[in-house]
């Protein structure tokens, strides 16, 4: 796939399928900077986005009265460098919306792309990947199921019912 041309149909289908899995409601599109190539402009036209926000606005606190939309969709190129890009993605995930879909190039060494290890560290899981070395991947984050609950985190290991009648805590 040539990253300067439009996205393959499979990428648009993956976006629509992923958007259909989330409850209806407002969908936020994170605007990539001007001049970004690849599938980002075509993806912006593919979905029914109700609100749009620039990537640089993610570094600021949400405006007063901000309602978290059901879903946010962003492309990998946020137009920010290094730690600012990570902070913007983390703020998008933590403050701006409950569910995030992120498109990123999967080729190693791609400028402005995200490595799978960095995305896993931020709580994202891979939902879809186009075939080929120079493909694109779709990663998702859901606030309600981003982390599996460990077995030890339940009342069975926290309480001692056999001691309830012996000691007063």
Image (cartoon, rainbow, N blue to C red):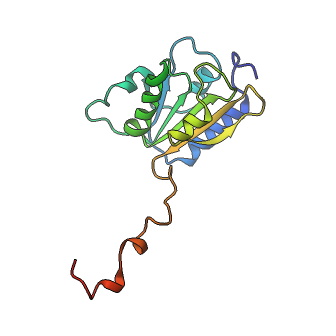
Residue appearing at x 45%, y 24% in the figure: 83
Residue at 78% x, 30% y: name it.
132
**Quadrant location, the N terminus:** top right
Viewer-nearest residue: 157 or 9: 157
Residue 6 in the image, given as x and y percentages of width and height? 69, 21
Q: Which residue lies furthest to the top in this view?
A: 35
Q: Is residue 19 left or right of residue 107?
A: left
Q: Where is residue 93, by image quadrant?
A: top left
Q: Quarter-wise, where is residue 36 in the image? A: top right
Name the residue at 67% across, 40% down.
Answer: 128
Q: Which residue lies furthest to the bottom in this view?
A: 165
Quarter of the image where the C terminus is located: bottom left
Q: Where is residue 139 in the image (x, y as percent from the top left)?
A: 59, 38
- Side (left or right) of 134 relative to 93: right
Residue for point 37% across, 39% down: 68
Q: Is residue 147 above or below residue 48?
A: below
């Amino acid at each position: 796939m040539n990253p300067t041309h439009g996205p393959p149909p499979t990428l648009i289908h993956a976006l629509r399928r992923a958007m259909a899995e989330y409850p209806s409601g407002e969908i936020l599109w994170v605007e990539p900077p001007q001049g970004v190539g690849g599938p980002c402009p075509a993806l912006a036209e593919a979905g029914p986005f109700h609100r749009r926000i620039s990537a640089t606005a993610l570094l600021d606190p949400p405006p007063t009265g901000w309602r978290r939309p059901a879903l946010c969709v962003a492309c990998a190129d946020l137009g920010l460098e290094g730690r600012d890009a990570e902070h913007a993605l983390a703020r998008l995930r933590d403050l701006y919306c409950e569910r995030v879909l992120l498109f990123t190039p999967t080729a190693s060494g791609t400028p402005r792309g995200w490595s799978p290890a960095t995305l896993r560290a931020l709580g994202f899981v891979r939902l879809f990947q186009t075939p080929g070395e120079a493909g694109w991947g779709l990663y998702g984050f859901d606030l309600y199921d981003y982390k599996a609950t460990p077995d030890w985190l339940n009342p069975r290991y926290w309480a001692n019912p056999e001691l309830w009648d012996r000691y007063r805590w």
